[in-house]
Image: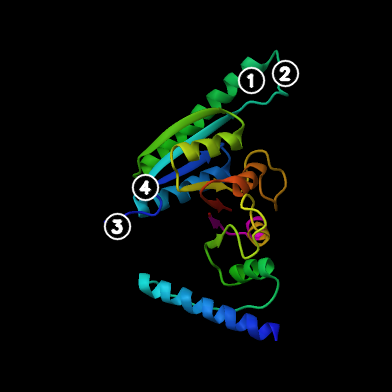
Amino acid sequence: MRKSLYMNILVPLDGSKYSEKALLHACDMAKNYKSHLILLYVVEKLISINLLDRKEYLKILRKFGNNVLIKAKKTTTRQGMDSKIIMKEGNITNEIIKLAKKEQCNLIIVGSKGLGATLRFFLGSVSNKLANNAPCSILIVK
Amino acid sequence: MVRRALNKHHKRFMLIAKAMCTKKGVEFLDVIEYGEEGRTIVSFAQKNNFDLIVIGSRGMGTLGELFLGSTSNYVVHSSKIPVLIIK
């Protein structure tokens, strides 16, 4: 077996249908390249969240993130792939880039936009920032 | 004059690319299109029903290593099909 070009593939998820599509692409690629999949959910920590509701809000987000990750893990096992799930907290783009560096990922697969995007024709803010600042190659699924 | 020089340049480049592809055993179809880079790439990909665009993150003009080149940026933003950016 030849050594694969993409050993580690990082898939950041946010629960939107674009990220699900990205996950399917990732499964397909991982199967072909025999690479490891890393699934990531980042809980966004904004300063602008109301101080009183902060704890409650983060709790809900964490629960949602867990659900997303479990669902994604199920999808990957159905496709016959093993995957590692990670949850982080902080700024979304920074955490993704940090993890990509730490785990020495060769490829990041993201959807073209997430939950936040209302505009149809443009790239989401996270995808855009990633495309500009990512340390490795990046596949943007439309 | 400029056009002839460019022609020579990209013919040579296509030859290199073709050699690389045949070495790896991949079929290669070379097409040369004229026009604005980003728009031509996107419309060509759409017209011929491609599934993926693979593009380098930086082109010939190296202003800064940190950001995406203008053509890559245009393609990423406006194509309707998946784009793979190579760093």
Q: Secondary structure at mark 4?
A: loop
Query: Does residue B70 appear in the picture of this structure?
Result: yes
Q: Which of the two discs, 4 and 3, labels the residue nearer the N terminus?
A: 3
* Colouring rule applied to residues: rainbow
Q: Position of residue A99 (x, y in %)?
A: 49, 36
The answer for how far apart the CA atoms under marks 3 and 1 are is 47 Å
Please tell me if label 1 and label 4 are on a single chain: yes
Query: Which residue in the structure is indicated by mark 2?
Result: A50
Residue A35, label in figure: 4
Amino acid type for the residue under numbered disc 4: Ser
* Residue A84 located within the stretch drawn in magenta: no
| Badge 1: residue crowd in 10 Å (few <14, some 14–19, many ≥20) | some
Amino acid type for the residue under numbered disc 3: Arg
Front of the two marks 4 and 3 = 3
Query: Which residue in the structure is indicated by mark 1?
Result: A57
Query: Which residue in the structure is indicated by mark 3?
Result: A2
Amino acid type for the residue under numbered disc 1: Tyr
Q: Which of the two discs, 4 and 2, labels the residue nearer the N terminus?
A: 4
Q: State the extent of the magenta-drawn residues as a range.
A: B75-86
| Badge 3: residue crowd in 10 Å (few <14, some 14–19, many ≥20) | few
Q: Which of the two discs, 2 and 1, labels the residue nearer the N terminus?
A: 2
